Image (cartoon, grey):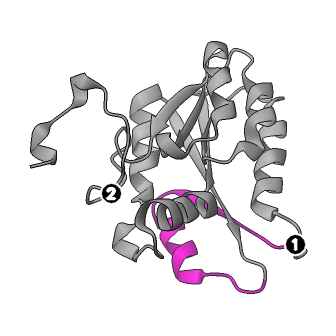
Amino acid sequence: METARTTHVLVDGENIDATLGTSILGRRPRPEERPRWERLLQFVERQWGQQTNGLFFLAANSELPMSFVQALLAIGYRPIPLSGGANQKVVDIAIQRTLEELKSREADVVLVSNDGDFVEQVENVLDGRRVGLVGFTEFRNSAFAQLTTRGLEFFDLEYDVNAFNERLPRVRIIPIDEFDPTAFL
């Protein structure tokens, strides 16, 4: 029996949260300003027409954020709480290992991060499968741009995925076909 192809959605929540807080809002995001993560899985399912496996990587070190973990479970993610030494970027290490493992599997992948620490692993899975990168376009590591010729697809967490309830105060280059003057008046 043939099984449906799966897209593994790997979420670097720390990176998205840090970009949102530091670079976009200039402060710690309030809960209502954070992405609606269920919309991401729905977007990927609609966009690529296949089931998703949402993996949400968390640095938990000494304490497990149970309310957040329970919320992730309720919307279809598999939380992956990690711990390690003070100098270890545990989320990055785990995502890199997961991307390396996916190389040997028949599946597609969407990475949710702006972090250039994954460029090599993303390049390695661009072998004919569908590979996407979701984040904030203006903060995406520029090294990913060279991978578009190999098939890497880009999606903006706000504008493509519509993961936020309200517009973020972002400054971005607007394609003229998308320009709506009412957003500025």
**Residue 19, located in which quarter of the rendered image?**
bottom right
Single out the residue that lies furthest toward the bottom: 63
Please tell me whether residue 80 is drawn above or below residue 141 in the rendered image. Answer: below
**x, y percent for residue 156:** 44, 40
The residue that label 1 is drawn on is: 84
Q: Quadrant of the N terminus?
A: top right
The residue that label 2 is drawn on is: 168
**x, y percent for residue 160:** 37, 38
**The stretch drawn in magenta includes residue 81:** yes
Q: Nearer the viewer, mark 1 or mark 2?
A: 2
Q: Is residue 141 left or right of residue 178?
A: right
Element type where label 2 sits in the image: loop
Near mark 1 (Cα within 10 A), the count class, few <14, some 14-19 or many ≥20, is: few
Mark 1 vs mark 2, CA separation in Å: 33 Å
Q: Is residue 125 left or right of residue 158?
A: right
Q: Bounds of the magenta span?
A: 62-83
Three-letter amino acid code at disc 1?
A: Gly
**The stretch drawn in magenta includes residue 119:** no
Asked whether the viewer can see residue 2, the reply is: no
